Image (tube, rainbow, N blue to C red):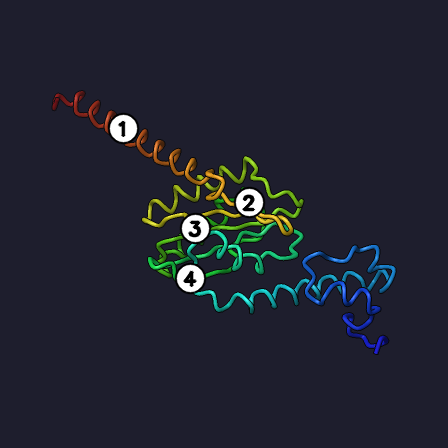
Amino acid sequence: GATTENPYFAINSPLLSRSQVFPLEPVPEEELAALLGEKRAPRYLRLTTELARAYLEDSSRDLKHVYDTDSAVELFRPKLLGRTTEAVCLMLLDGQARLLYNDILSEGSISAVPVYIRRLLQLCIRYDAQHVLLAHNHPSGNAAASQNDIVATRQVEMALESIDATLNDHIIFAGDDYHSFAKSGWLWTAKREVRRQRQEELQASREEEREILRRGGLL
């Protein structure tokens, strides 16, 4: 009945039918507060989000291969749904695009790359992953890539290159919207920049080696 302690049944039928228990468009907090009271509304929001996340994860569990951004989004979204702080999610695939791993890598800003880059590489090696996808959320509601996001993508690409793994995409979620580095072309720009930087480092190393040999009278 309407007096039970279960928050899903402590609301009137219009709100319940509107939320469908798994709301992708949350009921406004002020409306919940008016119906449930100031103390019970946050609990309802938290439990509804957790239930929605579990439901979406269960519905995407049969997806064993990830061939494109759309299938990656389907698997990433439940992990980041409803989070009010930034979190970084990691997906690992084998050479046949089969899913090996999909979980939260780090909680905190994507710009804190040194915090999670070591764990990222450890997981890649442990699962013998050949393809990597990253995702994180923007609680602000704006899915556009920031300068920090671009720098972090470049750093991850450089780290993965050292273990012969490929970064397939970096996806930013903001509510129902998302931004794909692969679809937008930003990923390929990052890859070119990393390749150019590696070439410059190699050229500088060769020039330094020649200078040492010249000073030693070997050239």
For marks 3 and 1 on the same chain, the one whose residue lies earlier in the sequence? 3
Disc 3 + disc 2, Cβ < 8 Å: no
CA–CA distance between discs 3 and 1? 27 Å
Q: Nearer the viewer, mark 3 or mark 2?
A: 2
For marks 3 and 4 on the same chain, the one whose residue lies earlier in the sequence? 4
Residue pointed to by mark 1: 203
Residue 118: give its label. 3
Residue pointed to by mark 4: 65
- Quadrant in which residue 213 is drawn: top left
| Residue at (78% x, 67% y) in the render | 16
Please give left or right for residue 78 compared with residue 2 in the image.
left
Q: Nearer the viewer, mark 3 or mark 4?
A: 4
Looking at the rendered structure, the kind of residue marked 2 is His
- Helix, strand or loop status at disc 1: helix
Would you call the spot at circle 2 few (<14 residues within 10 Å), some (14-19), or many (20 or more)? some
Looking at the rendered structure, the kind of residue marked 4 is His
Residue 7: image x %, image y %?
78, 70
CA–CA distance between discs 3 and 4? 26 Å
Q: Relative to the observer, which residue lies in front, 156 or 132? A: 132
